[in-house]
Amino acid sequence: MRPPPKWVRRLVLAPLVVVAALVITALLPLWLVVATAVSIFIEPRLRTPRLLWMVNLYLLWDAAALVALFAVWIASGFGWRIHTPRFQRVHYRMVARMLQFLFWNAYWVLRLDIDVRVPAGFHDDDRPRVIASRHAGPGDSFILVHAVFHWFHRSPRIVLKDTLQWDPAVDVVLNRLPNRFIAPPPVSGRRRPSDHGLQERISELARGMGPHDALVIFPEGGNFTERRRSRAIERLHAAGLDAIADRAARLQNVMAPRPGGFFAALDAAPDADVFFVAHTGLDRIRTVADVWRELPTDKTIIMRFWNVARAEIPADPDERTDWLMREWERIDEWIEANRPEPDADTTPVARRRHRPAAARDGVTRS
């Protein structure tokens, strides 16, 4: 569902979140007592109080961010200087701290661990980066941006779905920074407009990146589902790309990438290093029902980065498409090899620090 107009998001949704956070927090002690009692007799994993706590925490997180963002808006001269470099840095620091707080609580409440593996020398250069990741649920976007901020010390520029603007805090802060909200691809049989000028908007976002910037993009265009995977294959056949469609049909864990936006970013940032990201651990968590089933997650999310030298990226469009498919086949193979065991969600993982030791250089090389 597309987000409502900006004035509705600012004047209705944002105040509603603040009020809801205050009301739920005031009643939280009572709700936790009831939820814990019910959970003890119905299921031993305390899913009900855990989920209630995280929902309340997220609402408070959103509400506190909105209040802070409003204060920053006033300090900027009621929005007059909101897009100046100084206030851009203020907003980046806010996003970094917001994510750090959220992940610290997810670590302790959900028993969620993140294992980031990067090639040697990942932190050494002062060059912009284009980072392309598979997409497997709303959580992977937060985790990837968290990694870019805290472990790789980059300022992300993100290409993300416009539906995320339903979240008031995400809507406000990311619209004040160099990001692009795009409409998901139109679905056959539904009256949903496509995002016109998508490639030019991504090119504009990639141009002018500084040495410590990183453009983050999800070329699949949406979370992986079997239905979307089938539609992607049908779309390739309809475009006459039968060979690519046959290769896409052999992918079991990812969808065929949409190359236009990713290639636009590469062309607009010819000096940027290129990285691909594969990850596993969140594949089964896409809806509220999935969150309920998986709580407590007891999961280790493995995130693997690897880079491709710019000299290895073909200039010819057909060869470049073939190259991107090879990288996506590599992601698919990596996921298959690192997929958690079927009963892994019931086996507690070893405890580690929230900052993964694997974020150091040279943990994984290929």
Image (tube, grey):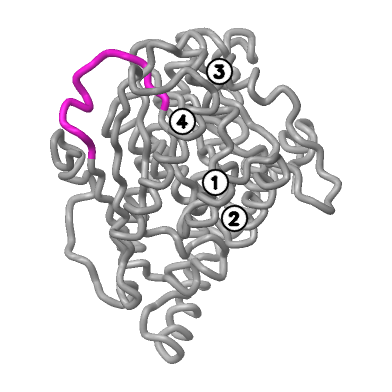
Q: Name the spot of residue 144 as percent of width and height, x first.
A: 39, 40
Which residue is tagged 4? 216
Q: Which mark is residue 320?
A: none
Q: Is residue 155 visible?
A: no
Q: Splitting the image into 4 quarters, where does residue 275 fall? A: top left
Magenta residue span: 118-130
Query: Which amino acid lies under the numbered mark 1 shown in the image of this protein?
Result: Ala
Real-space CA distance between mark 3 and mark 2, rounded to the nearest whole angstrom: 28 Å
Disc 1 crowd, CA 10 A, few/some/many (<14, 14-19, 20+): many
- Residue closest to the far bottom: 41
Labels 3 and 2: the sequence-earlier one: 3
The secondary structure making up most of the magenta span is loop
Disc 4 to disc 2: CB gap under 8 Å: no
Which residue is tagged 3? 205
Labels 1 and 3: the sequence-earlier one: 3
Real-space CA distance between mark 4 and mark 1, rounded to the nearest whole angstrom: 18 Å
Against 233, residue 63 (above or below) is above
Query: Which amino acid lies under the numbered mark 2 shown in the image of this protein?
Result: Arg
Labels 4 and 2: the sequence-earlier one: 4
Real-space CA distance between mark 4 and mark 2, rounded to the nearest whole angstrom: 22 Å
Q: Nearer the viewer, mark 4 or mark 2?
A: 2
Q: Name the spot of residue 104 as percent of width and height, x first.
A: 32, 49
Q: Splitting the image into 4 quarters, where does residue 212 fall? A: top left
Disc 3 crowd, CA 10 A, few/some/many (<14, 14-19, 20+): many
Query: Which amino acid lies under the numbered mark 3 shown in the image of this protein?
Result: Leu
Disc 1 to disc 3: CB gap under 8 Å: no
Q: Nearer the viewer, mark 4 or mark 1?
A: 1
Labels 2 and 1: the sequence-earlier one: 2
Q: Name the spot of residue 263 as percent of width and height, x first.
A: 53, 24
Which residue is tagged 1? 256
